[in-house]
Image (cartoon, rainbow, N blue to C red):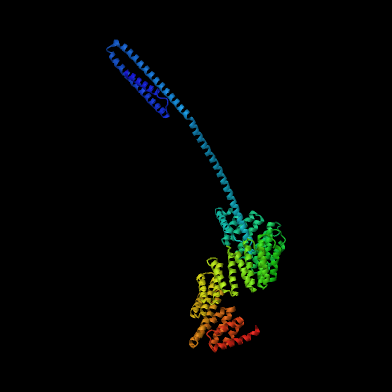
Amino acid sequence: MREILLGVFLSLACFAEAATTDLDLSREEVRAYREKTIVLEKDVAFLKEATGNRLEAQDKRITDIGLSTDQHANHIAAVANQTTYLGYLIAFIALVGGFAAYFTATRQAKEAANKWFESNAQELRTQIDALKNEADDLQKQLRQRAIDAHSEIDQHATDVTKHATDTQQAISAMAQRMFSNAFSTDQVPQPSADAATIEAVQAASEALESKPERDFKSDDHFTRGLNEFLANRFDSALHIFEKALERAQVEKLMPERHIWLMFARAASLGELGRSEESVAVYDEIDRSFGPSDRISVRELVAAALLNKGVKLCQLNRREEGIAIYDEIDLRFGEDTSPDIRERVAYALFNKSIVLHQLDRMDEEIAVYDEVNRRYGNDESPALVELVAVALFNKSTKLGEVGRYEEAIAICDEIVRCYGKKESVALRLVVAKALVGKGSWFGQLGRSEEAVAIIDEVDWRFGKDDNSALRELVANALLNKGTYFGRLDRSEEAIAVYNEIDRRYGEDTSSALREWVARALVTKGLALGQLDRREEEIASYEEIDRRYGKDESLFLVELVAKALVSKGNALVKLDRREEAIAVYDEVERRFGIGDSAVLQGVTADALNGRAYARILQAKHSWQTEVGRQGFLDHAISDLTRAQVNSSGGSRATILGNLGYAFFLSGKTDHAEDLTKECLRLGGDESLQAQRADAGVQRIELLDSEYETLLDRLWDDLRPES
């Protein structure tokens, strides 16, 4: 019983302690008290069970004792029962009290928590509001980013579509220029595809690789064919363009598109050298679409006829070509379409070129005048350039026939009309006109004015980066050096040649390399005129050093000429053995070439070597065997040289051969050859042969040779 009471009192003490806990609790403390209450509840239950078990054991003992003390059994049992009930009652009261204390503590904890939340509510609300605002901002940002992303995607899609459209338009425009402008001439170059368009065509063609060919449209075939055409695979291009035409029959394309496919086929045939078939395609275009009144179709028919005219002229059927150009003028000459006007203008211009080839000068000039009359005031860039070229061609033609003043006047008109234009094509025409004007002044012997014109060319175009203009300026400067030479201002001429080398010597352009090589050769000749032989020889050696391994035929020929000039300079320095070695090198390096120029230069080298042998013979005149051996070598070289000689060189070779025979005592051969030399070379050859007789003079033999020259010259003068 005491144990029960002790448990009850302990329980009450614990619950009382929990009930009297300070109310200012934190949430963690409330949780701890709750856990402690649960433990106490478990202890009460355990004590209750232990008390019950002990009471039952006591009852059992009392029952056993009751066997001996029956008279007290009932009384003790009653007391035991009452005690048991009292224990139960006390335990129940303790339990109820414990629960009451627990709920009281819980309520107080809740009240403490509520008070804590109430005291911190404002701060929590502030934090919650801040978090809410931050969440709202994030949501707005996400929403804006989504909008921006959609806009960017839409813009990208628009850009892709625009790029695809622009690319297709660029490809179409390029194809039209290439296939319909086959009528262009060297003076008005045919448009070529730019690198960006070529890449676009390649990309479009590659994109078609994943598409089955059975699903191709005519445009797909055209794109693939164009890619092959641009890659110079013309057989393949022709095959694909023909597929495009077959597909076009099924698709029933617009006439313009069908004509473009026919243009592509004709162009491919032309590139394959099948010009007759190309002409047949242009005839088919005219036959099928010529009657159309649709302006866009008429433009293409005019272009087809123009291309046909060009092809006929390439086939040397020039009269038929002229007839086609006249037909274009007849059928379309009054048309107001800008495109057709250009076609007609080109037809007239091409006609003038053919007339030039046929040497029909008056008709040619008349056509230039007609082009200027019809289109001289036109503002179309293509026509402005065409008129400028026509005027320049007219000035060139007039200059060629000696009408220099008229030619100069036209050059002045070109500069006045187009001198301030920024178009590269027009700047080129103006530069050509000024260079031409300088040439005409030079032909008139007005070299000072010619130099002034070249200075204007250099002032206008000397700093231009355009390769064609740079070449023109180099040409003009070379001419300036020539004009200085005519004015006996050799030092100034040499300075100009050095300036050409300084400006353009490092340029990799093949054309400019050629102009620099020319300048170095001319510089060497100018140094020779000043008897600065060592510098002259150094200039020729520099040419060989720079260009001796070049594959350009022009430069190869120029190097060969420079070496011959070097040999000639060595002869004049009486370094005949060195000269002969140089001539030997020319024969070894260039004697087997197929070039007519190289064959002529080799002939000049043989002539130079023969002349050196003649001088060696005269130097060794007292030794008959020695001199005759040198003369025999000379005669052998000159005999070979005359086979490939022409013009002034031939006259010189024949003169040297006649002189060699004369020195050998073969006067009959000498007389015939010397007479032919004087007939071909005139007074210049006469003076040259007299000069040869004066070198290392052998009396009386050279005096007899001079007498022969005078007699032969007198015989020829009635024929002069």
The outermost residue toward the top is 71
User: Which quadrant is home to the N terminus?
Assistant: top left
**Which residue is located at x 41 percent, y 25 percent?**
22
Farthest residue, direction bottom: 700
Q: Residue furthest left?
A: 68
Q: Residue 662: image x %, image y %?
A: 55, 87
627 sits left or right of 180 in the view: left
Residue 640's spot in the image, x, y percent? 54, 80
Q: Quadrant of residue 700 in the image?
A: bottom right
Q: Is residue 445 visible?
A: yes
The front one of 607 and 257 is 607
- Regarding residue 318, the answer to whether it shows in the image is no
Camera-side residue: 618 or 180? 618
Q: Nearer the viewer, residue 301 or 341?
A: 341
Q: Quadrant of the C terminus?
A: bottom right
Q: Position of residue 528 (x, y in %)?
A: 54, 76
Residue 377 position in % (x across, y down)? 70, 61
